[in-house]
Amino acid sequence: MKSTPFLKKVPKIANNIVIRKEYFGGLIFNKDTMSVYEINKRTLNLIKFIDGKKSFGDIIPVCSRILNTDINEVKTFLNILRKGRFIQW
């Protein structure tokens, strides 16, 4: 994967976000907006990689391999999290 400034960024879960594991996957709670989002197990597993230590360049290929999904699908999901302000760097 070609290195870009985006891939060097190290994401972490935003300070206003709480993630709770549930039998179906989990819940994402935004403390600022009081919004709750239901996520499936696959999404929860991907979010676990966002730990404030690994860069996007580290996360994307590992998630793709472990979750057996296309790299572009992982990139799209991470972009959704970024646009929704669930993650920050």
Image (cartoon, rainbow, N blue to C red):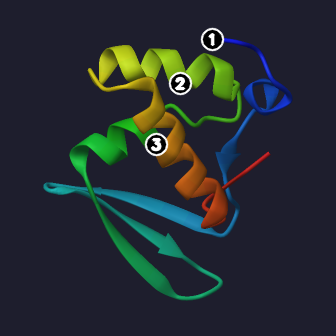
- Which one is nearer the viewer's eye here, 11 or 72? 72
* Closer to the eye: label 1 or 2: 1
Q: What element carries label 2?
A: helix
- Give the class, few, some or many, for how many residues have Cα within 10 Å of label 2's Cα (few <14, many ≥20): many
In the displayed structure, does residue 36 sit left or right of residue 6?
A: left
Q: Which residue is drawn at 59% across and 49% down?
A: 79
Residue of label 3: 47
- Residue 1 got which mark? 1
Position above or below: 55 against 31: above
Q: Residue at x 26, y 20 (%)?
A: 68
- Give the class, few, some or many, for how many residues have Cα within 10 Å of label 3's Cα (few <14, many ≥20): some
Residue 50, image x, y percentages: 57, 37
* Closer to the eye: label 3 or 1: 1
Mark 1: amino acid: Met
* Residues tagged 3 and 1 counted as in contact (Cβ below 8 A): no
For residue 20, say whether it is visible: yes
Mark 3: amino acid: Ile
Mark 3 to mark 1 CA distance (whole Å) = 21 Å
Residue of label 2: 60
Residue 19, image x, y percentages: 44, 59
